Amino acid sequence: MKQQRIPIYKILYPLAFLYELGVRIRNCMFNHNVLHSQSFPLPVICIGNLTVGGTGKTPHTEYLIRMLLKENLRVGVLSRGYKRTSKGFVWATSETTMPQIGDEPYQMKSKFPSVLLAVDANRCHGISCMISGNEHPVPDVILLDDAYQHRYVKPGMNILLTDYNRPIYKDAMLPAGRLREPLSGKKRANIMIVSKCPSDLSRDEAGLIIEKLSPEHGQSIYFTTLLYGNLTMVHKEYASDTQAAERPLSSLRKDEHVILLTGIATPEKLIHDISIYTDNIQSVRFADHHQFTEKEVKNLNALFERSGTDSIVITTEKDATRLMSLPLSKELKSHLYTLPIEVKILFEKEHEFNNQILNYVRTDSRNNSLSE
């Protein structure tokens, strides 16, 4: 998959200059302790980016959850809970609904019920609540989802993601591009991950990307690609002898009509990867975290009716959390599948990456007051 041309709106450079100036002043105030960052007495890992959406934070956070749980660690996850209906600090439980905590936190809690997951726009307050021990055991480690610019918290480890298809060194500041802060912000990262790479990325190309990223001394860089699980029915109650609840992605026929329904920032790689199996893809795209209206639901039902029952609707796990409770037609529900995504670390660096994370967690745990 070739890198696509990155749209930069040069006419908006004057506004981007003003935005960048404001961000630089804010970062300078944190760097010189005019604004204060708070440290916490346990390992805190931040997973974030310099851009607005689309780098794959959720599957990378899930990778960390999966790996840390295998080490018998009590994992906490704190998210802002974007577009949730609740306010303040909220613990996620088995009874918590998606609107109460947001689509991505709901997805993670559903997949990893043992994780201590909470949402709070004020990350300092959120961490303080999580480590109080009042309602739940204190986590061994807390993962901060999408908090790279939330500098009131000082994490022990920063993981910065950049999309292979839209690398930060080719981007521009908002609103001309998608950068939330200047490239100098990457200096705060302990680890940089180039996400959504082609699975056959060559070492030579990886070397060129590393050169352009210009890592600081001590910064590690890893490359990841996406792995897909089986297509899984969102409404499993419609499974039958002739229509299995799960089917491999490779089972798609070349002529099978796929309606790809996405509300994510950058669906291009997903479209490309599904096109390996079928030539008949109809992409229906909405904005990231899109909340579907009654009219849009009617349009989706009508679209599927026109397409016929030989069609299949594929959506992402995140989008499925918002689609599950909508009044979709029985026909659409019985052909609605989600495509699970995991990440794979390229160039046989998984062991090295895992050890870097675990060494930080174990060292910090030995040194913090909560472990005493």
Image (cartoon, rainbow, N blue to C red):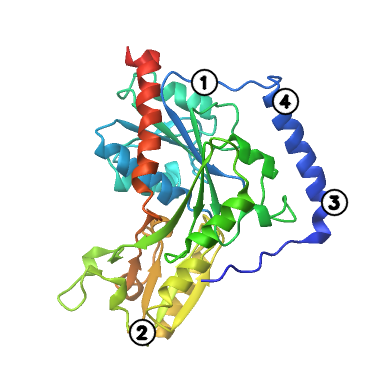
Q: Residues within 10 Å of mark 2 (few under 14, many from 20)?
A: some
Front: mark 2 or 4:
4
Q: CA distance from mark 2 to mark 4?
A: 56 Å
Mark 1: few/some/many CA within 10 Å (<14, 14-19, 20+): some
Q: Secondary structure at mark 3?
A: helix
Residue that badge 2 annotates: 256
Q: CA distance from mark 3 to mark 2?
A: 47 Å
Identify the residue shown where x is 51% and y is 54%. 289
Residue 27 horizontal/vertical position (percent)? 70, 31
Query: Residue 218 placed where, x, y %?
Result: 53, 35
The residue closer to the viewer here, 261 or 165, is: 165
Q: Of tags 3 and 2, which is closer to the observer?
A: 3
Regarding residue 96, the answer to whether it shows in the image is no
Hey, what amino acid is under mark 1?
Ser
Picture quadrant of residue 45? top left
Q: Which residue is mark 1?
A: 39
- The residue at 46%/25% (across/down) is 127
